[in-house]
Amino acid sequence: MQIKRERKEMEIPVIDFDELDGKKRSNTMAQLHEACEKWGCFQIKNHGIDEKLMEKVKHLVNTHYEENLKQEFYESQVAKRLEIKGHTSDVDWESSFFIWHRPVSNMEQIENLPKDFCSTMNEYIVHMIKLAEKLSGLMCENLGLERDHIKDAFSGTKGPSVGTKVAKYPKCPNPELVKGLREHTDAGGIILLLQDDQVPGLQFLKDGEWIAVPPSKNNTIFVNTGDQVEILSNGRYKSALHRVMAEKNGSRLSIATFYNPAGDAIISPAPKLLYPNHFRFQDYLKLYVTTKFSDKGPRFESMKQMANGNGSLLP
């Protein structure tokens, strides 16, 4: 297995939503496009979500963990295995639970969630969905697709699925022996992360090296794209490998909202982004002779139309 080195000097791209209106829009859109193509992750500042609401969500999650989950975690089999320095490569040093919001909420079925927690999370998730759909529209614009292509592709019969993984990565006495969360890509679509503003741990793989994501100052939202966005974009936008490192000096907060396809959504690459296929080379050469010194894009499009029986070889 190839050894992946850690490199911490690279900065995660930052997209300023305030610059989407006005003279800097084209430059900001280009920055977003590059972040999706080359990184698979980025940060958003000036997203318009009320900071008091975000701080309240973090406070309620931290309180719930301290009162209901912390002791249980340190008494768990994971903690006991680490204590005896047993095999830990198949476990994660995290305490987490998952909230479904759309199409149906499960918050009332989760034990010990106070009403204030539920009502605050419901308010917060409305803003998260709006942000995810704004992002999906911007991505579609950059890809040359209809603005609602991702949203429509994710919708199925009941609309996109939305859920939040609420996690704490507790202080770890032996962080060299276990990961907070093992390396993986996310299965879904667009992931919006409200994370700790003090404790680090999140890392993304870029060009064979692990890049540390710093704690989120000023309530920036960290975004990464999942496997379904990579599929829909025909590989243009990447689903990046990431992990969480266990930390000895702090307990890290992670509130990750997933904007995913519905379970019955049919996922495939956007036809507009596909290369032509299933054609005879001699047919391509026939078109090439008359378009050799022109841009190849229209030539590829003509071949796609011909393969679908909707076009001709005439330039």
Image (spheres, helix red, strand yellow):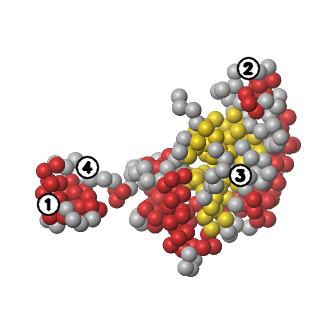
Q: Position of residue 26 (x, y in %)?
A: 50, 72
Q: Position of residue 2 (x, y in %)?
A: 53, 31
Residue shown at 72% from the left, 43% from the top: 201
The residues bearing labels 4 and 3 have C-alpha atoms spaced at a distance of 43 Å
Q: Amino acid at mark 3?
A: Pro
The crowding category of the residue bearing disc 2, from other C-alpha atoms within 10 Å (few below 14, some 14 to 19, many at least 20), is: few
* Circle 1: element type: helix
Q: Which disc number belongs to residue 86?
A: 2
Tell me the residue that label 4 is attached to. 277
* Circle 2: element type: loop
* Circle 3: element type: loop
2 vs 1, front mark: 1
Q: Amino acid at mark 1?
A: Val
Q: Which disc number belongs to residue 289?
A: 1
Q: Which disc number belongs to residue 214?
A: 3
Position above or below: 285 against 169: below
Q: Amino acid at mark 4?
A: Asn
